[in-house]
Image: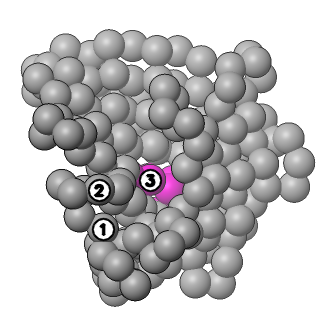
Amino acid sequence: MRTELVDGGPTGPRGKGCWSGLTAAAAIVLCLATGSPGTAADLLQALGGRWATESGAPFTMDWQPAADGFGLRWTVPGQGEASVRFTPAGRPGVLAGRVEGGWSMFGGDKPVNPLENGTLYWARTTADAVYVYSLGIDDRGGFVLDRYACSPSEGGLAVSLLRRLPESRVERIDMQLVRVDR
């Protein structure tokens, strides 16, 4: 597991915290070489099961693929555990997150308003990665916006957490997970 503090500067194509063109090209070649799944549904099936870090760090992900999306239970660094059910949000590749009790900004029993209470979750899928987002706002108006980029890698699951915090602080944590069970 690698943790990096990225400065508050731009995170665009030339800013810190982004892949250079060479790194992106290498990632594409790696995905092609490892036979990455062809569709988002194939990818979700491949992710099914429990994953954990080899280093003994307390990070796990448990993926439960479903016909209409997926369930995910994971360890949120510094915050405990989250369990969310993701279902289609009406836009291709975008899924709304629902936690127990019906919390969902995109519909459901009680829409979550992160300004009042709760965390907003959503995801997007591509043929070679799943991106899971969460937005929480504290009682002083500060926010934590997490983006988990999850993609198959040789021998496991590569997870890159990009955490945006108040005052333009950005943290990046890269992890390599291995399958614990199916």
Q: Is residue 97 above or below residue 83?
A: below
Q: Secondary structure at mark 1?
A: loop
Mark 1 and mark 2 residues within 8 Å of each other at the beta carbon: yes
Q: Secondary structure at mark 2?
A: loop
Q: Is residue 110 left or right of residue 15?
A: right
Q: Amino acid at mark 2?
A: Asn
Q: Is residue 155 left or right of residue 72?
A: right
**Disc 1 crowd, CA 10 A, few/some/many (<14, 14-19, 20+):** many
Q: Quadrant of residue 6?
A: top left
Q: Quadrant of residue 177?
A: top right
Mark 3 and mark 1 residues within 8 Å of each other at the beta carbon: no
Percent position of residue 33, x then y = 66, 44
Say which residue appears at 26% left-offset and 24% top-offset. 170
Say which residue appears at 56% left-offset and 36% top-offset. 80
Say which residue appears at 20% left-offset and 40% top-offset. 139
Given this view, does label 2 or label 3 mark the residue nearer the observer? 2
Q: Is residue 158 above or below residue 7?
A: below
**Disc 3 crowd, CA 10 A, few/some/many (<14, 14-19, 20+):** many
Q: Amino acid at mark 1?
A: Val
Task: Specify whether residue 71 is painted magenta.
Answer: no
Mark before the other along the chain sequence, 3 or 1: 1
Q: Is residue 71 left or right of residue 64?
A: left
Percent position of residue 16, x then y = 22, 20
Q: Residue furthest right?
A: 181
Which residue, given by chain and number where applicable, does mark 1 sit on? 112
Magenta segment, which residues?
126-133
Nearest the viewer among 181 and 109 is 109
For residue 96, say whether it is visible.
yes
Which disc number belongs to residue 132?
3
